[in-house]
Amino acid sequence: MNNATVFTFSVDSALLRELGEKLVSTVHVALAELVKNAYDADATEVRVSLTPSPTGGPTIIIEDNGTGMTPEEVANFWMRIGTTNKESQPTSKRFGRPRTGKKGVGRFACRRLGRRLELETIAVATTTQGIEQAVRTTVTFDWDNFTPGTTVESIPCNGLTQAYPDVRPTGTKLIISNAESDEWQARGFDYLRRQLAVMAGNSGAKRASFDEDTGFSVHLQVPGGDEQPTDLREQIINAAWGTLEAEIQEDGCASFTLHASGIGGKRTFLTSPRFKSIFGAKLRVGILPMAKDGGGVRDPKLLANYVLAKLIEDWGGVQIRYNGFRMYPYGNPGDDWLNIDADRGRRHGRPHEAELFSFASSMQKIDASRVLLNMLGMRNHLGHVDLPSSIPGLEPRLDRQGFVETGTFELLRTFVRMAIEWATIHREAYIRQRVSAEARQAIEDLGPLLDADPKKLDAEVTPRATQFLRHEINRLITTLPAEEQAETRRSLLRTVKALEAISADSQSQLRHLRLVASASTLTLLFAHEVRSSISSLGAGSARLRTLAKKVPDYAEELNALSRQLGSTQTQLARLVDMTGIVGAFRSDQRAVDVNLSSALEKAVSCFRLIIENYSIHFDTTGVKPSMLIGPIIEGEVYSILINLLSNAIKSLIASGEPRKFIRIWTEEAGRKAFLRIADNGLGLDAKHFADVFTPFISDPNGLLYDRLEENANPEDAAAFGTGSGLGLSIARDIARARGGDIRFINPDDGWAACVEIELP
């Protein structure tokens, strides 16, 4: 016989331990949860006091002046686990504040703070006769009574209710005691003050259909004083080197604004419309470098009252406010939710976003691939991100320790990191500009000292300055005790010699650059002179063939000599073809659309002799014949192609591979053209992908030119040389100036190296 049976769930008391002691990870987070409840109850003020106990943790009192709870609300909401009343009523009754809690478990943070709770709350209730009166409710919770194995419903919590004939001030008071240990002392009360100071960002608001919100403040009473903790970050943000503000617009674009020292006023930037799903997110951050990081603050008088290192340690970090309330652990010491410190540790220099890379490339004296190497640490950025709960996809974790790592949160991280990287690019430009200005000022200051015209001092500043230093050293040494003179003179003169050596190296590099700059002119002159000789060889070859017909007895020898002259003419003509494209470097050239396939064919032809001599096979079947690039100056295209082809050819010859292959192919993506050149030569270690673009670094692997000497024909050794280390740097600068780029990428299987050229 079957009997109908109804089964119901029951809740074991062990759940309260999980919610209170394990789900809430620290006492500071637990306290924050209870202060949030005061905020949701429309309190304008909450007072927190900690009274030490000789036997364990302190007694904690949290008292607010909010709307309080009626007996029915205590029973139906406070004492119901997982209640959804805040979801059904997402705004507070009086001020219309967006409520911070939704899951209905935050109040069990009380158990994290102590084993006993006394709840006292006063609220305005309406009688059945429609009369408003104040009702006081008190309930005592002894959490030790809720032992595992019992059900929550079976444990009584004793309480009282009392109605008053008049309306009295409302609010809620929590008295928490019997904590097993004093966790507060682990970080000290100063840490607690800072946490309370930055907990809420509500300084007042007027929301439609609600009373005017006058703001929310927290007062702390601990041994040593009663005070309202002060959030120093706003003062620091306004006094720091720069204030960065960013927000997501309705169309999904991110708008960045930077007010900073030494950048010439306000700077702004607008991204592409990629952030629409986090519309409403706002960022406000101060950028505070230490003196060793370049310094430069806007209000040194204010910050002079503090030790910068201490300010950064105590107040630094980018926090998140969700519905106006601090979301832990973002911005805590050791937190790196933006991966700034991680990237600094691995010396990441390139902006993560293509938009920022293009922006950095457009700035003078900035190497876009290394611009982030001077990025400040996470705690040197002080401020917060404000997030409304209306952003879909942001899900707070159950343990109140941040958000679930969803795609929405990753997009938020990208937005904040992108804004900070943009500000870092401006700061790098500021540092470069300041260094240049200081150098110019130093030269001007040296003029009168060295009895020279500052305007003519640039080239001779080092020899004149070191000569002056030597004279002054000899003069000042005589004022020292005799036993100190010799050692002091040696030390100072060693310093002077070091300065002279550095200056000599810089001058050598400058002369090298000047020689490179003059090379195209010399090449054109050479080509002009050789062309006249080539035509003479052609004429001589033709006369020998004519003479062979007239002198049959010597026809074979004369024809052989004619063929030899013809071959020499062909070889010289090909050499001159290599210089022929130099005409594309004329200063009067204008930017035009260039057929990439045609330009590539000409560039490859420049190496025809070497290609034939070393049996190098080219595969260009993947090059689209009709692809146009530009607008770009034709000579710029050849500069890029010849540099990259030259490197690939040298790598092939150096490898000693019997079968040498170069594959070239093109792709299109949007308004960009991509040309890739792969070879099966020596290859390039991925750790050197960035190094090869550094000026004067021609062979980071240290193998290329030694292997070239071993495997190249002796007559070609002079042609290959040892490299200037400038070719790739120049080629990449050209590409970036046109909105493109050049980068080494991991090659496909079977290939040793692959370089990618991106052009408009």
Image (spheres, rainbow, N blue to C red):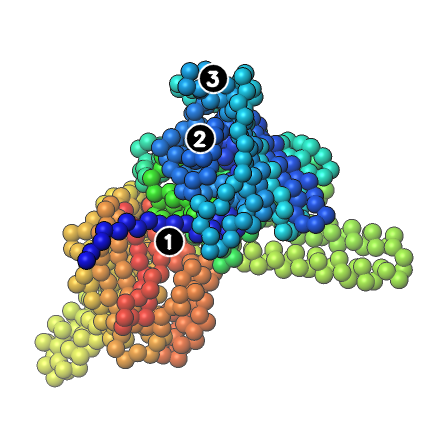
- Per the image, the residue denoted by label 2 is 72
| Marks 3,1: beta carbons within 8 A | no
> 49 or 603: which is nearer to us?
49
Q: 362 left or right of 222?
A: left
Circle 2: residue type: Glu
> 37 or 727: which is nearer to us?
37
- Would you call the spot at circle 2 few (<14 residues within 10 Å), some (14-19), or many (20 or more)? few
Circle 3: residue type: Glu
Marks 3 and 1 sit apart, C-alpha to C-alpha, by: 78 Å
- Per the image, the residue denoted by label 3 is 132
> Going 82% across and 52% down the picture, which residue do you hit?
475
Task: Tell me where residue 662 appears, x and y as whole percent.
Answer: 26, 68
Checking the image for residue 39, the label placed there is none
- Per the image, the residue denoted by label 1 is 732
- Would you call the spot at circle 3 few (<14 residues within 10 Å), some (14-19), or many (20 or more)? some
- Would you call the spot at circle 1 few (<14 residues within 10 Å), some (14-19), or many (20 or more)? many
Task: Tell me where residue 54 appears, x and y as whole percent.
Answer: 72, 48
Mark 1 or mark 2: whose residue is earlier in sequence: 2
Task: Tell me where residue 69 appears, x and y as whole percent.
Answer: 49, 29
Mark 3 or mark 1: whose residue is earlier in sequence: 3
- The residue most toward the bottom is 553
> Going 31% across and 58% down the picture, which residue do you hit?
756
Location of residue 80 with respect to 614 vertically, above or below: above
